[in-house]
Amino acid sequence: MASSSAVGKLSREEFRRQKDLDAARKAGTAPAALDEEGKPINPHIPQYISQAPWYLDTGAPSLSHQRRAEDSDHTAPSLDTWYDRGATAGPAAKKYRKGACENCGAMTHKKQDCLERPRKKGAKFTNKDIKADEVIQDVELGYAAKRDRWNGYDPADHKRIYAEYAAVEAARQKLREEEIDNQTTTDLAAVRKMAKAGKTEKKEDADFGSSDEEDADEDKYADAADAVGQKLDAKTRITVRNLRIREDTAKYLINLDPSSAYYDPKTRSMRDAPNKDVPPEDAKFAGENFFRMSGEAPAVQQLQLFAWQAAARGNDVHLNANPTQGELLHQEFKEKRQELKESSKGSILAKYGGEEYLRAAPRELRQGQTEDYVEYSRTGQVIKGRERAKAKSKYPEDVFVNNHTSVWGSWYDVSSGAWGYSCCHSSVHLSYCSGEAGIAATEASNAQNMLSAPSEPTVPSLETPSSKTETPHERVEQNFSKKRVGEGEVKLDKDRLAQALKEERKRARGDDEDDRLGKKQKGAASGSHDVTEEELEAYRMRRRITEDPMANYVDNDI
């Protein structure tokens, strides 16, 4: 069979043709494939044997990867091959040689690599006690020899340990016999007591290990010990698994709400998080689904999905049979997909433009962060540094119209529940500012002030002799009514309206500055001036409404 493992290089038609050829070879109607040496390959050999790994694939059908490599010149290193420690190349020199170690005089190493004790005066200056040259050995170790932890160990060293322990035990026995012989009494009980004390001393001696009896006791009770995570009964040989540690909290006790995550008692699993309001990173237990989707688990799932999809398209990819190949192909697939995505993005930007809109501002500028230091006092005043500028609105700010010194909405009338201007306490939007006189008029028109003020006789005005005195019913209605100046049905005097229109035209043209200045001074001297209905109507009639679409319309047909 063909051993080509080049995945993704066969089309659908070539793959079907290869399958038909393999079936014909198995049936005997087609000649068998030949390897590199010209030997026929049995078509009934399974594919996992005939197919070479990706790191040994030559691109041609062959079974050489199943045969032992024949190399007559090279002999495999022995497992017991090791360095000959302490071997010297001949006797030591008599005099110091140039280029030798300045400390010991050997030619095989330098002073910084010398393992001898540093001398007060080196061999270079004394020419005494020059050491012999070491044998530089080049030992070639195989795979097993490099990883053999006992390679180079001399078993004779263990015999010396036995001899040392035997000598110590013999010396202790001899010392105990001498102590018994030195006893002046011949009492048998004293001798037994001395022997027992020596035996106890032998058991408590921790420098030379335990006795044979202690080892026997340990072997006796070793089977009865419990393993970690389980309880074993040595008599009945029944293993009882510990379900959990006592300090751990069971999953079903984290949240006792019946509507919380479901706990399966058979499998002891809780897939969802018991506490939905706690972030999974901070929760003590976030559900088993969180652990399944954390770490490298999603990457393994994506790799398995890629292997399934590649196998469905006709590619020979199997994650369990050859995980290295699947990982490399998945990495190559992700790189090609990223390159294709970037190329398509570049082509779209080159065709339609708009790359400048994709350039985002730095994170520091987007969040308004700065390194300027500003220090404030307890009252909120800036002590050091410069205060951060306030953000500008798209609407015009601090624009005063109609002689106002404050904006609309800077004052709220509690009695009427309306917003107005704080400079004149007027609740009429876009009204003309009347200053302190407007504030006094607003306070005077308040119902509580009118009721609490003492009653005064009504003095008929000299300018309007035809005006009638207001009745008490009209005064109360005026006090408690929500109507203000310019609202509702009012009766205007034609003469006063004509005079107000004349004054409004003069004000608009800017004429008669002396008269206006004189009137202002006179008004300031005489007191506040109330705005009449005629003046307000004249202002409205002369005002130009810029928002009116028909303001500049002129009918030329007439």
Image (cartoon, rainbow, N blue to C red):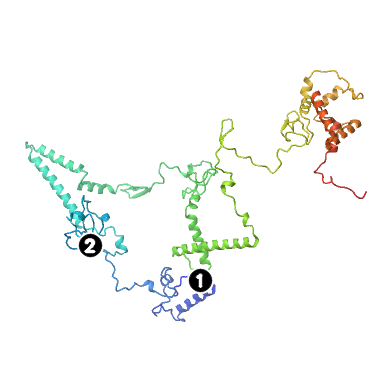
Q: Which residue is mark 1?
A: 9
Can I make out residue 379 in this image?
yes
State the image coordinates of residue 464 (x, y, percent, origin top left).
Answer: 90, 25
Q: Amino acid at mark 1?
A: Lys
Mark before the other along the chain sequence, 2 or 1: 1
Q: Quadrant of residue 340?
A: bottom right
Residue 177, image x and y in percent? 10, 43
**Three-letter code for the amino acid on which mark 2 is drawn:** Val
Residue 465 drawn above or below residue 308: above
> How far across and how far down the image is residue 377, in percent?
56, 31
Specify whether 38 is left or right of 440. Answer: left
On residue 541, the disc is none
Q: Which residue is mark 2?
A: 135
Instruction: For mark 2, give the secondary structure.
Output: loop
Q: Residue at x 24, y 54 (%)?
A: 115
Residue 527 visible from this viewpoint: no
